[in-house]
Amino acid sequence: MQQLDRRGAAPRGRAHGRLDAVFRDGDGVAAVRPPLGPPPLRHTFVEWPRAAWGVAQLAIEWRALVTGPAGDGRPVMVLPGLFNSDRSNLVMVRHLTALGYRASGWGLGRNLGRRTIGAEGERLFARVDERAAEAGAPVTLIGVSLGGIMARLAAHRMPGRVREVITVSSPYAGPARATRVWRAYQRITGDRVDAAETLALAALVRSPLPVPATAIWSRSDGLVNGLACRSDDCRAIEIRSSHLGVQLRPDVLRAIAGILAEGAAQ
């Protein structure tokens, strides 16, 4: 059985390097492709040095970043990744505020999965609803890693309160085992990645959103398979970054500012 891409050409690399791979048997009938695996260890082992370099880049380029396109004052909520809190996104929030957006964190403390947002996400939904009511407008949700998965869940559950979703290195489009942290996820959140309820929520999150969405992702991500962080039903912007500290990368901050500016111009 030969692995082919959509153009009928044999792809390069292993399964972790192809999102669009399909399999065809001898009669040309398409079969299900294997699930994405975790990222290569060569990327995982250099996560910390690459994250440190990202912080250095931020320090070098900060002055240039604050001259980005002016915001339209819309409400923006930034959701943190696994085990992180609003402190991890402080730079992004301050950057967006300086550009003219009404940016804030989520105000729910550390992201411990459903232990934080509630069994059905009710605490997160209440927070989004409150923020939209305060602003008198739907909220743009920006989620980093697990926060992006939660942002997509909120958009599915309450599309009238969510204007747009931007995910940053969020593995919403692949299985939990396409990451190097799924065991840590289980310990921290108490959720089993193969439980029926977890799989049902994952299927909902993975489905096309009723609001505009953009996925920012990195092929060289060392903790999650970058190809699990994008899908064909929404715009995807590829960057070069580690997973750790991705929200501090100048390229990410520029990309987000550009996405928001496009919405302001419409």
Image: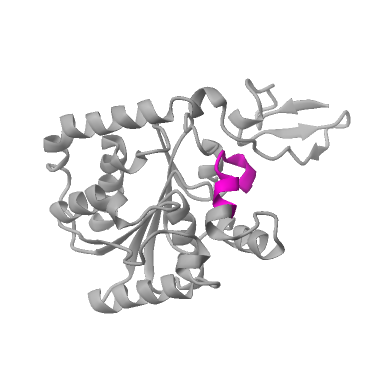
Q: Position of residue 105 (x, y in %)?
A: 29, 61
Q: Main secondary structure of the magenta part?
A: helix
Q: Position of residue 66 (x, y in %)?
A: 13, 43
Is residue 182 covered in magenta?
Answer: yes
Q: Which residues are magenta?
A: 174-186
User: Which residue is rendered at x = 64% and y = 61% of the image?
Assistant: 198
- Give the total number of marks visible in the rendering: 0
Q: Is residue 220 left or right of residue 205?
A: left
Determine the image quadrant of residue 108. bottom left
In the depicted structure, whether residue 99 falls above or below residue 52: below
Determine the image quadrant of residue 62. top left
Q: Is residue 203 left or right of residue 50?
A: right
* Residue that lies at the very extreme toward the right in this rendered image: 27
Is residue 197 covered in magenta?
Answer: no
Q: Position of residue 250 (x, y in %)?
A: 26, 36
User: Which residue is rendered at x = 70% and y = 60% of the image?
Assistant: 195
User: Which residue is rendered at x = 65% and y = 38% of the image?
Assistant: 36
Q: Is residue 157 left or right of residue 175?
A: left
- Given residues 265 and 134, the one toward you in this image is 134
- Would residue 4 be seen by someone viewing this image from the given angle? yes
In the depicted structure, whether residue 186 falls above or below residue 223: below
In the depicted structure, whether residue 203 falls above or below residue 48: below
User: Which residue is rendered at x = 13% and y = 35% of the image?
Assistant: 64
Quadrant containing the C terminus is bottom left
- Would residue 174 be seen by someone viewing this image from the given angle? no
Quadrant containing the N terminus is top right
